[in-house]
């Protein structure tokens, strides 16, 4: 298995790989610095390094993760990883390239798309739909029947009530309490959550 990325997200995913008794061969990074722990080599990306390999894109930023995906998708296969301490209902589905971190709980009939990060100790309740390239941060709580559109970011400790839709590329701030639908590209903070600004179309504020 290969990681694309060698920063903090890669370190967490490396631990996840070990929890599943998998082997990490090496890492590739657009700016390799050779400082990854455990003496694992970090190389500049090249087609021959990832061709026909199982790859995880170990980058926390949703927009960057999607750009890398489109750059390398014809060269490799993508692995899906679940930490040994996470719970995923047998009635839920998880897309390729998605990583599910320690102590996550994903309940019945949840659909999670491709290349998502479902981070430490968050909860995704029944019948939620999480589209591609979403990041749900640690200890966020999503009630039932929530739709999270492509590229959205749910901040650490945020709470979202049932039936809400989070629009494409929206950002929910840390600890926010979301009681109503959030439009695409909106930045929401506070309790109750309020829109404070709109993000640019490609995800940067």
Image (tube, rainbow, N blue to C red):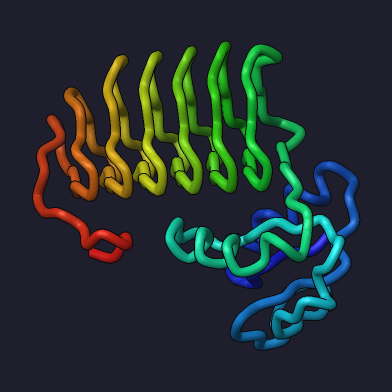
Residue 197, above or below 45: above
Q: Which residue lies furthest to the front in this view?
A: 74
Asked if residue 203 lies left or right of residue 184, the reply is: right
Closer-to-camera residue (186/154) = 186
Residue 67, above or below 44: above
Q: In which quarter of the image is residue 55?
A: bottom right
Percent position (x, y) of residue 137?
44, 44
Residue 108, above or below 203: above
Q: Which quadrant of the figure contains the N terminus?
A: bottom right
Asked if residue 80 lies left or right of residue 70, the reply is: right
Q: In percent of the image, x 46 and y 44: which residue is there?
A: 134
Percent position (x, y) of residue 15?
74, 53
Percent position (x, y) of residue 88?
65, 22
Q: Which quadrant of the figure contains the C terminus?
A: bottom left
Percent position (x, y) of residue 101?
62, 41
Q: In percent of the image, x 62 and y 61: which residue is there?
A: 58
Closer-to-camera residue (12/25) = 25
């Amino acid at each position: 298995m290969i990681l694309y990325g060698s920063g903090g997200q890669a370190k967490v995913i490396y631990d996840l790989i070990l929890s599943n008794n998998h082997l990490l061969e090496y890492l590739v990074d657009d700016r390799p610095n050779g400082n990854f722990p455990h003496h694992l080599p970090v190389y500049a990306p090249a087609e021959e390094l990832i061709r026909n390999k199982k790859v995880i894109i170990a980058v926390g930023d949703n927009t960057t993760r999607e750009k890398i995906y489109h750059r390398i998708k014809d060269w490799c296969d993508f692995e899906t990883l679940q930490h040994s301490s996470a719970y995923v209902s047998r009635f839920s589905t998880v897309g390729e390239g998605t990583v599910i971190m320690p102590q996550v709980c994903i309940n019945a009939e949840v659909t999670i798309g491709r290349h998502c990060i479902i981070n430490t100790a968050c909860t995704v309740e029944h019948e939620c739909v999480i589209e591609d390239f979403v990041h749900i941060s640690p200890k966020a709580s999503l009630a039932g029947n929530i739709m999270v559109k492509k590229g959205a970011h749910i901040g650490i400790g945020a709470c979202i009530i049932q039936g809400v839709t989070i629009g494409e590329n929206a950002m929910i701030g840390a600890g926010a309490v979301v009681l109503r639908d959030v439009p695409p590209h909106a930045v929401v903070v506070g309790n109750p959550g309020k829109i404070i600004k709109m993000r640019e179309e490609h995800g940067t504020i």
